[in-house]
Structure formats: structure tokens, C-alpha cells
Amino acid sequence: MSGDLKIGVFLCECGGNISDTVDLDEVRQSLDVEVIEQFENLCSLNGRKIIRDAIIEHHLDRVVIGACSPISHEKTFQDYVKPLNPYLMDMANIREQCSWVHDDKQKATKKAITLINASIEKVKQSDEVNPIYCQTPDEVAVIGGGIAGMNAALSLARQGIKVTIIEQSPTLGGHMAKIGKVFSPVKIAEECGMCLLNPILNDLVWNENITVWTNSKVISANRHAGTYNLIVEKSPRFVDIDKCIACGKCSDVCEVNVPDDWNEGLSLRKAIYRPYGQSYPEAYVIDGDACTKCGECKRQCMMDAISLKQKPEKVPLQVGSVIIATGHQLIDPNKRPDYSYKRHPDIITQAELGRITGVNGPTKGKLLKANGEVPKRVVMIQCVGSRDEKPDGHKYCSKICCSVASKNANIIKHKYPDTDVLICYTDVRTPGMFEKYYKHTQSNEVRFLRGRPGEVAVKEDNFIVRVENTIKGEFEEIECDMVVLSTAMEPSEGTKEIAKILNIGTTEDSFIKESHPKIKPVTTDVQGVFVCGTAQDPKDITDSIMQATAAASKVSEYNHGGVEVEPFIADIDHEKCQLCGDCLDKCKFKALSIIDDELVLDPMSCDGCGKCLTVCQQGAININGNIDEKIFATINGVLSKKGDGERIILVFLDTIGYTAADNIGVNRLNYPESIHIIKVHSVNRVRPSHIKHALDNGADGVFIGEFPGDLMYDEVERKIEMVKTQIADADENPNRLAFSKVYIPYFEGLARKLNDFDKQIENLNEIEGV
């Protein structure tokens, strides 16, 4: 039957992303199919018309798209091939896994032809199957209680969705609660940050759909049947928030003083304290690391709200989706010792300056040096750790530093007109309406000098800032009595931790990576997990709030629209099934159960791994979609184009590994043209017979990658070792088969492993004379 199928191939130039490296004319000439079309941007509406018109006009049975990754665009093209069944289409990834990883045009073209041919052979074995739709729980976890997390939670709660905010610190508010004043580029004015934050906080507190867990963090997570099962560790506050009336008498009798992190360590607080005046929960909290357990606070508390024997508590939480709003931290200025931070109290950061100028700060809003005097000249140094090629620096721009420096400079000039403020900058970056604020800052007699200082030297009670004026081309020494460092924004430790726990892809700088920066800006590469705020990249308050409401909108869409499950899962023949229960014991995903004397499958849980097939003696279970035949066909499609002396390595990856491989291309790393990646629904579906077939029919090596968090990891590892033994027993080299862990964030490691395996196979070929 497959020989009579009419197949259409549609090639995308991708605006030069593909056509600049792959000779598409040669590709067209090499393929023997019913229809071959080429278009500049195949994912556009015009591209859809080309595809649909060709399907109808030529009565096509199958379609192959030679374009970008199915991870980002498969759903788009599945829609475009209507009226065909969406699963009678396959995508050959000739962008992320061809044109973006190979520089040699001739070799890249040959590779593209091979990948497309593999897809052609695969669709010949494809059957019509229909997607499965399932509902997920409405409950949502918002991880992080800063301005982004609070707004996301409020937006969802107002739609009637139950939300739990999980915040690691003792209070909500995040960085916004600390900055004193914020500014609007439209009003050209600085406004009280707390006055803007408090209405949001009040709305959140009084919303019955929102539960707030402070002093808490997610320590583990797994997904089952469309539900995320989180384990949240609640650290003890040692103060009952329902009993505490925040009278402060406990703090008055506490004799332990420690640096106040709310004031950036510029003042002291007690071991029992309230983070700030308007903090929520409206209760005191005990710093467990600082408390001596003397009991004075407990004896003083007339509400009996204090318990010094509280222990950490692990609490389960089931939700349908997750929003990551874990925020950022600022780079440690001590990583740039040339600026003498901490060697003198009058060398501070913009964050510290924000607390100093805040009316609720350590000096009640007065800008004073360590000796109590108002500074005569303040020099601000931009890009401390940003746009920085040095070790421990960040190559990216932190986006808001120029605007923050301008704001704080204006605050100084408003309060102390005689204080000279000079900003040393690399390039002033104030996009959009913020340019108006920059012009306002200049008109306010704040001076700007283009050049990044190389050193801050201490001279008695003053400083010498040594800088190259890059406009004049001269070196200057600027004397001042206060230095302010504009430090880079970087991912918080909480952001890095939750990325590992949820196995979320991250950028090379460890921010949470969106699924697609243009068309899916708040969606991560894990279904049901979304991101907003500075957990995703540096941004200001306005952008954080906009992204938070966008994430909430996507969660609402996700919850109410249901989840589409790919149909390549187990199918049960109830007439053959004898309810022996063997499959129940073997299914690691707990997708099977017996209800009312019938074997029932949970489609949200089934991974399509096929383990149940191997134990069913009655042959009552099958996997939808003709999976085994499609794997064989794909292998044949790759190897049929193998030339004399050509080295071909087959790499089998599931969605996690495939996404990591895509990230190699996105980041323009390289691996050899010998590497041919085949996407499978579950690595466990790659049978020993598939591996043997590949090696027997010309594959020089087989590489299988698996995420170690997958429930089938141990099973696959044992199977690979068994196959290696079989290969050795057949007097062949087992080193032609490799098994490796893969992670979405560690795509660089996957690239190295692919390069190393290619060299290993090349050496084996030389030794064995292949």
C-alpha cells in the first residue's frame, strides 16, 4: 500500500535561516515524490494556503515538512495539513539540527536530504489516529511572591481559580518592596513604591481564592495524570501568624542583633522581627540561625504566639499547572575587587542607595556618608557585572540599570541640589518611553561620562575613580566622596533550583527559557509550567506585571481548554484481556487500573513506553500509531542515502533529549554531519531489534539518550547493557552502542558527548578497516 501513496514535500527557507546553508534546489532535485514546494516562510498563512491547495489539488495522502523543529511548530503544521489527519504529517528538522549546527553547505545539504528522506519513509508507515483531550485540575501553584507572582496569582484568583503562592522568604513583596521609589517615564516623577505595592497586597490578602505559604519552597515534584504533585517544605516561623498581633514587645526584649537583610545589611535587626512595616503576613518571625532560644520573647508574648520547638514540615500540594516567578538576585560586587566594594562604607550598590533614600530606610531617607555628612560628589558606575566578558561576569545587558541610576540620581538632585552626580556609562540604554526620563535626568544637571571605570582607589576619606573617557579618548581621574555600583541582575538561587526540580530548560545564563521567545514568551518547554518576571530575564516592574498577567492568561487557557494528549499510547482489547493484572505491576507510570472488572487506561499518565505489551500473554494491549514500523522505516530512510566512506550515527532521543538537541542549534554549537537524530515518543520503544537492524544495515554507531528522571531510565539502561552483551557475543564491537543521560539545560554536555562518540566511532572504523 505504501508504494501507492501520494506524498508531498514542502520546504521552508525560513528567511535564510535554512536556505543560506542548505541548497534547497539540490534538495528538490534529489527527491522522488508527488509534489515538492518551496516557500520563504512556510509557517505563514500563505504557506498554509500552499500546503492545503497542494493536498486538495494532487490528492496527497501524506505530507513532509522540511523546516524547523517539531518542538516549536509541529502543532502549526498539523493544523495546516487539514483535511488530512494531523498525524499523516512529519517534520524533518533541517534548521535546529542541520543548518544551525553545520557550516559546510555541501555536507549540510546532504544531511538535509537524508533527514527529509527519513521522514518520507516514516510517513509511509503512519496511520490515522486522533488526539485525546483531557481536563486538568484548576488549582495553580505560583512559586515566588514578588510583584510578578502576586499579580499572576491575583489575575487567576479573580477568574475563580484557586491559587497557592509559595514564597521562600518570610514575607511577600520581593524586590519591589525594598526599592523605596519607582518612577514613571510618562509622568517624569518618582513615586512611593510601597504606595503602589500595598493595594495589590491588600487585594491579594483579602481574595478567598489565594492561599499564601511563606518560609516555604518546593523540594520535589512529579506529574501524574495531568496533576503536578509538589512537595513543599515549610520552614518554621516559630510565631503563630493567627495569634500574633504584631505588638513588637517580643522584639524589644530580644538581645540578639544581626544585619537587616531588608535594609541590605545597612542596619541591624533583632533575631525576632517583622521584615518591614507593611509586610505580610502581619506577624513577627524568628530567624532560626540567629536565635539563641533564650525564651525571653516567649515569656513576653501575652498572646502565647511563640513556639521555639517548631520543626520543618513537608506538605504535599496537587495542582494542574505552575507559574514560576522566582525572581532575580544581584551579582556580588566583590567579584569586581577593582571597585573596592566593602573596603569602605561609602562604596555602595544601587540597591543599597535605594534603601538609603527610602523614607523607611536605615537613615529615614537622608543621603549621608559614614561620617554623617552629605556627599559632595557621587559617581555611579554602570555595568558592574553586566556586558562583562570577564570571568563571573554576564555578557547580557541587565536592561534596567541605566534607568535605575537615572532615578536615583534625580532623587539625589531633588533633595541635595548642590551634590554633583556623575554617571559613568558604557552605553546609555533607556528603551521606549524611558528615553524621556533620560532626557529629564540630563536637564536636571546630572552629568554623564562615556567610559567604564577600571579602578576605584581610596584616598583618605575620598575616592579616585580612574576612567577612560571614550568620547575624548583621554584617561581621567575623578575625585568623589561616594561611589555607587550598578550591579547586574542574575537568576536567583530559587530560579536555578526550581528549574532542576521541574526539569525546565534554562538559558546559558540560567534564566528560565521560554518555549519560543516570540510566539510563546511565557510558556516553558514543560507542559503546564509557565514563567514570568525576572525569573525569565532582566526586566522592570511594568514588564514583570505584563508578563505575569500573560502567564495567568495562558494558565486559564490551559486549564479551561484542556490538555491535548498525543494518541501514541496503549490501547486495550477488552475481549482479549483476562484481567490477570501483570501489566498493572509492570507499568511504572501507574497508568493502568482495574475498575468494575475492566482494565482502564489513564491517557494523561501513559507514556507509550510499551512495557505493558511485553508482559501481556493474551496480546490484549497495543500501542496506537504503528510505532515500531515507523522506527524501522526512519532507520531505513536515513541509511538508504548513505554514500561510500560516509559515517552515519543514529541518535535516538525522546522529547527531553530532542529539546536539548534543539538548544544546541539555537546556541549555534556544532557537532559532526554524521549525527542523525531520530525523535521517539519514549526511548523504551527503541527495541533491541531496532538497534540490531540499524547496525546490520550500515549504521556506524547508535547513541541513545535518556533523562535520568524518567521512570523508564533504569529499564532502558539495563536493556542497553543487554544489547551490548548480545553484540559482543556476535563478535561485533559493543562500543558502537552508547547510552547517556540527557538534560534540557545541559545541551552543551550533549554536544560534547555527540562529538566524542563520533570520534570514538571514527577510531573504531579505522581500527576495523570499515
Image (cartoon, rainbow, N blue to C red):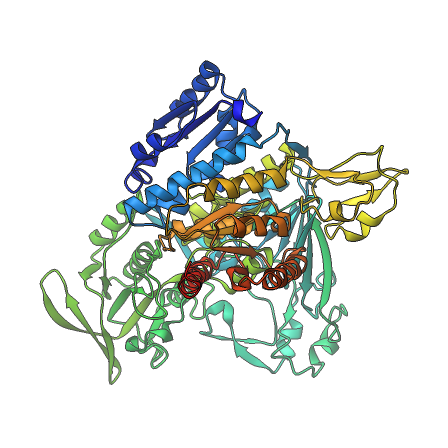
Q: In which quadrant is the N terminus drawn?
A: top right
Q: Residue 274, relative to residue 258: is it above or below?
A: above
Q: Nearer the viewer, residue 540 or 664?
A: 664
Residue 350 is situated, as x and y percent measured from the top left of the image, at 36, 64
Residue 148 is situated, as x and y percent measured from the top left of the image, at 51, 50
Q: Nearer the viewer, residue 84 or 326?
A: 84
Quarter location, residue 423: bottom left
Q: Residue 196, relative to residue 122: is it above or below?
A: below
Q: Nearer the viewer, residue 362 or 262?
A: 262
Residue 73 is situated, as x and y percent measured from the top left of the image, at 47, 36
Residue 197: in sight, yes or no?
A: no
Q: In which quadrant is the C terminus drawn?
A: bottom left
In the displayed orientation, state which residue is furthest to the right: 597
In the displayed orientation, state which residue is furthest to the top: 57
Q: Residue 198, relative to residue 357: is it above or below?
A: above
Residue 647: in sight, yes or no?
A: yes
Left or right: residue 746 compared with residue 371? right
Quarter location, residue 339: bottom left
Residue 769 is situated, as x and y percent measured from the top left of the image, at 41, 61
Residue depicted at x 67% and y 33%: 132
Left or right: residue 479 compared with residue 20? left
